[in-house]
Amino acid sequence: MQVEAISKNYSVEIACVILCCRIFVKTTPAAELEQFVQSHEIDWEEVYRLAALHRVRPIVYRVLNNNRIPGPALTRFRNYCHALSVFAFERQIESARILQVLREQGIAVKMYKGLDFTRVVYGGDISMREFTDMDFIVDNRQLAALVDVMLSQGYESPSLEYFRRFPTSFFDNRKDITFYKRSPGGRLFSVEFHYRPDSFINRQLSFKEFLGDDYLDSTQPITSQQYYQLMLINHGVRDYYPNLRSLVDMVMLISAGHKQVPEQLQRHECLARLLTNQLMNCAAQPVATGYDGSLTKTARIIINYLLTTSTRSLRDQIYTSVCLNRYSISKFRLLVRFTHFILLPNESDFMTARLPYFQLYYFTKPYRVIKKIFLNS
Amino acid sequence: MNPENVICRNEEKFMISNLGDEVVLMDIQQGHYININPVGSVIWNKLATPVAIKELISSLANEYGISTAQCEGDTMPFLQKLQQHHMLNIR
């Protein structure tokens, strides 16, 4: 897609953000930015808002700053990026501390996504990519011991009740457990321990398949080739490329080279190629699997979300994923899975009532949701 | 510290981030943040490999089109600050 067409059909500001991303991933020459800035009246506050929404503020700031864009436009970006550096440094230190504490207790964990991803894929500067959580991979057999250690370190988990009362259901239906703690400075640390890459598309999928048998060996960092597959799951399968950051990630990974992906990820890989080609100007070779109407329709829907920056509801997500499936039977299976996902009890249900069996909570969720809708209206 | 010394930056105790034309560092042990302004960042980047202070000053004077004496007067206090924060290795 031409930047001018985006500017005309959507907005000058989203076109500016996309242009910055393209320059960052080197699919467009930097000179185009100066020309673009000179020929359009740009609302820089809106550029900042969109960059924040798409989680690409450090990228936009770097590109604007390198290209000598007027100072006032940069102030908010600069302030945010300073804060992000501090945020990243603090989480880097806390991650190292958690790794050490868990290692001393015989619990093997490995850093994943967030800081580790930025280091591997963004050239080592941990504040070049917006992130929120500290993520680790763990073996689910060590989860009980891990929970005890994390609680002893002052962390709390909203999933504790669920995990302790129904551990089997927890392992089956979840892919991670989250902990929170306020730092002495009042900042919130959020830590996620993942024992499975995804709990939706395929619950049997394990980290072993992507990272090998010694996937918890922290002396062997996750490579960009391995991240390519893991991010197809994370950004593609789970979130349907929710923001421009996810597409920048994919372009960075495509540029770094990768291996062939398992069959169940191939359509998501095709989708990634279509989106990065259209929005990031990435001219990577198309993958072998055919591009059909449903795939291009899904890409069109996602592009529209990304360019209009409308928030995607669960209904939108269901629609997008149903569109992506080529065959009626797979669309039906997906709808069944979504229905189960929607009915699946969550932490709020366990807090609402104390019932003896997990299955009974399947009835409390609709009740709670309907009550909430009724109260809100 | 004198102009004959060879210096390079000590990164061991720091986490470093490049923000546009500035550099932000965090002292891992002390938990202090250090922000180096654009001119300081130019010097910091030149210290990636060992360099004699007099050569550093001469190169900066050329780059900014100022006299060596003026450059030395501006640069030495900055280098002393880096030294105070243990950000330099000096030979």
Image: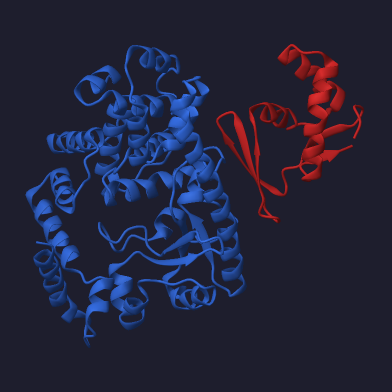
Chain colours: A blue, B red
Left or right placement of residue A191 versus residue B54 in this view: left
Q: Examine the rendering and report whether any part of residue A285 can be seen.
A: no
x, y percent for residue A255: 44, 32
Quadrant where the C terminus of chain A sits is bottom left
Of A242 and A330, nearer the camera is: A242
Position of residue A276 measured from the top left corner of the image (x, y, whole percent): 32, 32
Q: Residue drawn at (38%, 34%), measured in percent from left and top?
A: A48
Along the viewing direction, whichever of A370 and A75 lies nearer the viewer? A75
Q: Residue at x 44, y 44 (%)?
A: A130
Residue A217 % position (x, y): 55, 60
Residue A342 occupies quadrant:
bottom left
Q: Position of residue A355 (x, y in %)?
A: 21, 86
Quadrant location of the N terminus of chain A in the rendered image: top left
Residue B30 versus residue B49 in the image, above or below: below
Most foreground residue, A243 or A226: A243
Most extreme residue toward the bottom, as rendered?
A356
Q: Quick check: B47 left or right of A317?
A: right
| In front of the other: A181 or A252 | A181
Query: Residue sitting at 37 percent across and 40 percent down?
Result: A52
Image quadrant in which you'd find residue A207: bottom left
- Please name the residue shown 53% across and 63% down the image: A183
Work out whether B62 lies above or below A355.
Answer: above
Answer with the quarter of the image where residue A24 lies: top left
